[in-house]
Image (cartoon, rainbow, N blue to C red):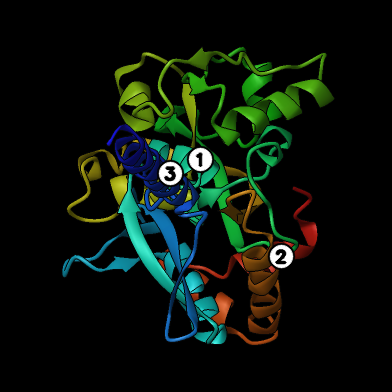
Amino acid sequence: MKIQKFIKLASLGVAAVTILAACGNEPDSSSATTTSNKDGVTVVKVAYDQAGKPMTFLDESGNATGYDVEVMKLVDEALPEYEFEFVGTTNDDLLIGVEQGKYHAGVKNAFWTEERTQKYIFPQEFLGLSSAGLVLKKENENIKNLSDFASAGYTLAPIAANNAQYTVIAEYNEANPDNPVKLQAGEEFTVDVVQWVNEGRVDGGVQIEGAFTGQVLTEGGPYYHLKDEVVYNEFAVIKTWPLFNKKQQDFADAYDKAIAEIKETDALRELSKEFYGKDLFEVLESVNR
């Protein structure tokens, strides 16, 4: 009787170990680094910043759109072996989510920085171009670039150290040690640049042209009433990139092949005109970042 009981308990133990082992081998469904397949097609999650108009945002019907999103839709069409699932989120969640594997890739008008290469795969082919400029009061519109701004001794709105715009200014300061911009690291990823400048809390701030246009120059924008009070002066055009999770090299390679073919057409130029109001690719030869 005792022998039979021992055998029964032993059998239960083996079964329990087997079940636990099987559970341990199952992929983590919360991690997007484990791709799913549907009818032989690899489904990938592509995150986008819902508040990044005109680069990435929700349209009036609640659909994902913007320059970055529409380019990735073209890439999706060119890759029949993949199916893109666009996931709207915040800027911070996108960065953390792609790094940790919640998303396979993300688009947010991202600039290249050395620090980011430690966290993400940057593909070989850039996604688009973005205009970066200084937001200033109308009375200071004679300040055309970072050198002018620094020489005037003006104060700049704080920029979070993990924001790529901070790196752009830091690179300028490194190259111009005799005329640096007063750069202050902020606690938040972004500050309300237009409001800070208008209130006189700072003399200027760095902003993407698309964001300035949406906030100030577009009727219905939150600062449309300031369209005659503040100006935007471009100081650089910078390449932008999609960010891929470190385990998604095959996906990044597939993107490279597809976007290289798309660049042989006028599709990206047309999207630039549609979302930015101008063809930024016209100045591509002078872009050095």
Q: Alpha-carbon neighbours of circle 1 within 10 Å: few (<14), some, or many (≥20)? A: some
Q: Residue at x 83, y 26 (%)?
A: 175
Q: Residue at x 46, y 34 (%)?
A: 135
Residue matched to label 2: 125
Say above or below: 215 vs 48: above
Question: Where, by quadrant of the figure, is residue 193 drawn?
Answer: top left
Observer able to see residue 253: yes
Q: What residue type is labelled 1?
A: Gln
| Percent coordinates x, y for residue 284 in the rendering | 72, 63
Q: Alpha-carbon neighbours of circle 3 within 10 Å: few (<14), some, or many (≥20)? A: few
In the drawing, what numbered circle is on residue 14? 3
Q: What element does badge 2 sit on?
A: loop
| Percent coordinates x, y for residue 81 in the rendering | 55, 83
Q: Which of 66 and 46 is in front in this view?
A: 46
Q: Earlier in the sequence, mark 2 or mark 1?
A: 1
Q: What element does badge 3 sit on?
A: helix
Residue matched to label 1: 100
Measure how far apart labels 3 and 2 are at the Cα level: 52 Å
- Kindly give the residue lying farthest to the front in the view shown: 1
Frontmost of labels 2 and 1 is 1
Say above or below: 171 vs 246: above
